[in-house]
Image (spheres, grey):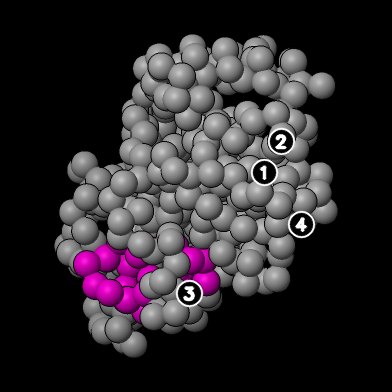
Amino acid sequence: MARRLTNSVTRREVLRSAAGLGVFALAQIAGATIGLRQTSAAPHQQLTMFVWSGGTLPAVAHEVARSYNESHPDVTIEVLEGQNYEIYPKMLSAYKLTPNQPLVHFGYQNVQWTTQGDRDGLWESLDPANVPNLKNILPAYRRPGDRGVAFCLSPVGLAYSTRFVKEPPTSWADLWNPRFKGKVTTIKYLWYYNGLVMAARMNGGSEKNIDPGFKLWSEHADQFAAFYNGNDDLRNMLVNGDAWLAAQDGANVEVWKQQGAPIEFVIPKEGGIAIPLYFVIVKGVTPAQKRIAEDVINVMLSDRWLSRWAAETYHAPTTIKNIAPPSLRGLSIFDPKEAARAIQLDWVTVAASDTMWRERWDKEVVAKMH
């Protein structure tokens, strides 16, 4: 079952919580730990799992949901596709309005919104006893209090159209290079994509001193052709020439290249931006729902599904095991040296500054476009 995010979410889309849970026995099947339901009079449980829309990103979520639904007739996992910047505010609003009726019960989140969720108190802690595959995750990607877990990593660098760009970009400064005037695109408020933080860092500022970044982009607002709303939009813009250059996750670009798109990816000389991706559980779930969500996350952290995710999305798993398909290990996004030198942003400051930066971005940059 799947739903795509639309501009409005009705209350019918908010799944009702239910109390009670059957007894679970754990079994190992095909290398994945899954919860096997024993006979129980527990009510049917319905949970919504969020995943990003676009390209191959939703594939594993749908496959896991179908598999879990088939083996657990008293559980229905629905998959909601969308973008973090759209769905997270709706999740937070639902939590504030009806704390025990989450819009999304668990699922995928990027690093910016995972950190914002820490500030908003939106995440439940995982119980390691219920998620034994946590033990295989590298320590750097276990979160404080186990409020979610990073399951993969990919650097953000520069994506460009090989059809229209003959001299590849080499630096983050190419985002504001005059040769790309009117041909840069980005997601409006995604700070590690839209160049704001890197402009600040490369001009004497930082996340805590963002003014140099706003000054630069205020002066170069005409670099932007338009803003895109999702990965498919970006791919189309680069293919048809509406945009030539964008900051983007290297994994997405590898997928597009495999599909035959004339798009290339480069890690800038300053380094890529390290972007871990997370599984989280949302506050407001019942104990029964939390236990099921933990069980599904444990499945997705198994070797089988992490390897499947890597093959589908070109993201490097954060497991201690070498499970990526051999054909992927030569790609720059899987290069341990690039991971080691990747730029680590101050995500706490980024999350704390989001509202203020949005207001300034609209006034100082968007208002000056064209």
Circle 2: residue type: Phe
Foreground label between 4 and 1: 4
Along the line of sight, which residue is nearer the eye, 30 or 201? 201
Pointers 4 and 3 in contact (C-beta within 8 Å) = no
Classify 10 Å Cα crowding around label 1: few (below 14), some (14-19), many (20 and above). Answer: many
**Secondary element at image label 3:** helix
Pointers 4 and 1 in contact (C-beta within 8 Å) = no
Q: Residue at x 25, y 83 (%)?
A: 27
Pointers 1 and 3 in contact (C-beta within 8 Å) = no
Query: Which mark is first along the chain, 3 or 1?
Result: 1
**Which residue is labeled 1 in the image?**
245
Disc 1/disc 3 C-alpha distance (Å)? 26 Å
**Secondary element at image label 4:** loop
339 vs 246, left or right, is left
Residue span colored magenta: 301-324
Circle 4: residue type: Arg
**Which residue is labeled 3 in the image?**
311
Pointers 1 and 2 in contact (C-beta within 8 Å) = yes
**Secondary element at image label 2:** helix
**Which residue is labeled 2 in the image?**
180
Foreground label between 1 and 3: 1
Q: Is residue 195 visible?
A: yes
Disc 4/disc 3 C-alpha distance (Å)? 27 Å
Residue 13 drawn at (x, y percent):
63, 49
Q: From this viewpoint, which residue is outermost toward the bottom?
A: 30
Query: Which mark is first along the chain, 1 or 4?
Result: 4
**Secondary element at image label 1:** strand
